[in-house]
Image (cartoon, coloured by chain):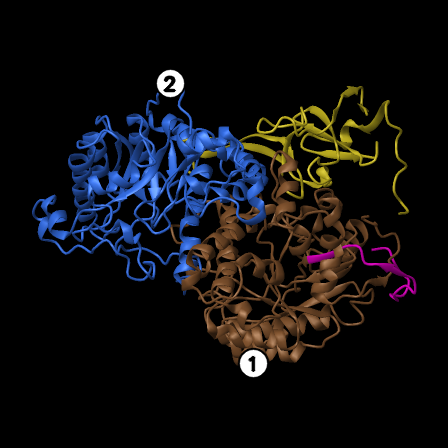
Chain colours: A brown, B yellow, C blue
Amino acid sequence: MTQTKARVPSTTEVPVRVVDSDVHPVARPGAVAEYVPDKWRKFLFSHPVGDTINYDAPDYAHAFAMRVDAFPEDGGFPGSDPDLMFKQLIVEAGSDIAILEPSSKQTIIPEATAAMATATNEWLANHWLDSTNNWHQRWRGSICAAIEDPRSAVAEIEKWAGHPYMSQILIKAEPRPAWGDPQYDPVWAAATKHDITVSCHLSRGNYETMPMPPVGFPSYNHDFMVTYSLLAANQVMSLIFDGVFDRFPTLRVVLVEHAFTWILPLMWRMDAIYAARKSWMSIKRKPSEYVKDHLKFTTQPLDYPEDKTELSRALEWMEAEKILLFSSDYPHWTFDDPKWLLKHLPEHAREAVMFKNGIETYKLPTTVPAVESQTRVW
Amino acid sequence: MSGDPPRLAQGREHVVATLDEIPPGGFKVVPIGRHGVGVYNVGGTFYAIANYCPHEGGPLCKGRARGRTVVDENVPGDAVMVRDREFIYCPWHQWGFELATGTTAVKPEWSIRTYPVRVVGNDVLVTA
Amino acid sequence: MLIDASVHIFCRDNKDFRSFLREPYASRGIPDYEMDWYGAPGGEYLSSAHGPDGQYPGSDPDLVGAHVFEYADIAILHPMTRGTLPDRHLTTAVLAAHNEMMVTRWLDHDARYRGTIRVNPEDLPGALREIEKYSGHPQVVQIGIPLQSRELYGKPQFWPLWEAAEAAGLPVAVHIESGQGIGYPPTPSGHPRTYEHYLGFMALNYVYHLMNMIAEGVFERFSGLKVVFADGAADFLTPFTWRMDTFGRPHLEQTPWAPRMPSDYLPGHVYFVQGSLDGPVGPDIDFAGEWLSFTGKDAMVLFGSSYPHFQNNSADALPSALPAEHRDRLLWRNAAELYGISVPEGANS
């Protein structure tokens, strides 16, 4: 980074044309540990643990599931250098606002997982969202919440609601039971009380939180990452069939990086079941209506057929402009470039998917301070 | 961006390097065309390929050159890598391309421009 | 012309069932057909399917025939049994009893019935024995295995089963097994709270099996193998194939035994029963034909009523938007080709 002048935001504003709903900041070694409450430090840090990778992405020993060109020169991990991220994502790729989604450590004890979420939130606020590191006002953050410990999840939401740069709550899909269980109601209550969107980024755990498929473990990263979407599909069915959106009619949920083209046949399937079983069900609306009003999906990684017109048709039938949010997943290897993604959207859906839905979902401004030499995607 | 070398004009032959600049296993990205051209020395044979992945426009030559995997049921794991360094893999989505042809068997229609390379004396020349 | 690719049959009662078992299995404890936690509230079966003398739904060939042959020319029978039991020998004996019941009571009784021979993937020698016994029967058209499993069907422990099915020229149908078997909870989040959620998700488990079979190169190794996912949900093939293909190229280096793009392995290998919950609904129904052509699904779908289950499908429910050629394929042509059923000249729907 050759910029030597003071990091002061430009006085010129540019319209927000690309909201990037999935970006990964990574802590430098030890940076999150600083913020872990004393009670849990011994539990979490008393024994060294190496890499825990299984279902490894291609060339993992060299690329570590990252874009190979996203490794900072100081030897840090991709996503650990805010300046490099700014250069590659904001300036070169052209995302205008990036929703930062850190990965918070999952443990087998809910309270310990909650402690990690607490620490991750402090770290993010102090190292990315503060006025020094967010001088350009392009970063927004996530309030990590351990869904399996609803009491502490609520406490985190209460603590960070109102922070100018925290734009969503971030939960995981892997813990059991599925989200429709009433034990999670306090979390939805806190989210809707403060009118903050709840997002879920795919993760992975161990054993039953792998997530363990009902019929056996995939063999390779290929079948693993493809079938991962079934967990999200299951959570959608739970939210809808278990009546979460009836109990919380203003709740908004975003599924991040779980793919989305499957929602089209899932809406049909749920509606067919509703039509056949209505007399046995207590939900008030047709399932697809809940999807359109309460759920959104990020676009990356875009799954597409050989014949792109099939994708266009599917996007039309699912009313993509109502349910999609652009995302890049920088700096992961499955990164989608915004210019590339834009080409695949039907014209009438572009504004909604690339920025309007994002502005609404995350309560973002419509303009941001200009950045020198930024690629304008469109 | 100060310090970048001037771009070479397209459509003609250029001396892009001396032999010792690109030893076997090495490569050099030269500023021809919009994205540049990667010149690779694979066991003494030179190849030149556009530094641009046709998938999403990734910087191809930032990726790792290596071989490809084939089935071999006589070894543990039932697979071996063959033809080391004859393929370049995009640093973004790890799409592999054969340096000699710019393509692979699985999807020949997704290919990258390759360019003629010749060695004259100590010079490596690329027509791009 | 219409072929019903999925009619489920049962024994009349436990006395009847045990009459097809030999000792020591006739004296074993065996669960009944119903699933405790996942049976449908209000009943699993059409009320009209219960016999006038209390016969178990789907247990009387004449009663079933009176219903099914009103609309179908041929019915593919798929016996439901008593779960994947911990004792694989017992499971095999239970399946063999149902196979014998099906062949002697149904296939030998009426030429319009075709049969699915149930085998146990956890007992390969027993399964191969059963295939050998029945593969020559002119009305046996496929092998049947449960959707529930503790390992995915692409893995090598199942390869001898695919080899035998391929050698016998018989497709393998995968269907949710009834009864109180052992296994894992039906969703990746554990147990669903409602039956409707179970109904929505359970059939989708085929996606795990299919993607694993593709990545493991099963269709490369067994080029004649045909698999029928008999609980439907063919619609999900399209988005998941798009995803499998999108990530096909980067993973070639990890799975060299599956060197082609994943979607290349589908034609001629993968089929689906199309039931009452399948296909576009609402305004999208106008595009049912277009959607069906995606991913070549029009060549894969087989009309199945799932009689006597409550979600009974009827040909009348098919969208009018389906082009005639798709209708023909769905209602009989795909099944006729798959199962080698000869069809009168000039047949149409």
Comparing C73 with A2, the one in front is C73
Is-magenta flag for residue A10? yes
Range shown magenta: A1-21
Specify whether residue A207 is in view: no
User: The N terminus of chain C is located in which quarter?
Assistant: top left
Residue drawn at 31 percent across, 37 percent down: C70
Residue at mark 2: C345
Say if labels 2 and 1 share a chain. no
Say if A108 sits above or below A205 in the image: below
Q: Nearer the viewer, mark 2 or mark 1?
A: 2
Query: Looking at the picture, how far across and down is residue C161, in whole percent?
Result: 30, 35
Residue at mark 1: A38
Is residue A31 toward the left or the right of residue A50 in the image?
Answer: right
Q: Based on the displayed image, in which of its 4 quarters is residue C206 positioned? A: top left
Q: Amino acid at mark 2?
A: Glu
Residue drawn at 31 percent across, 26 percent down: C169
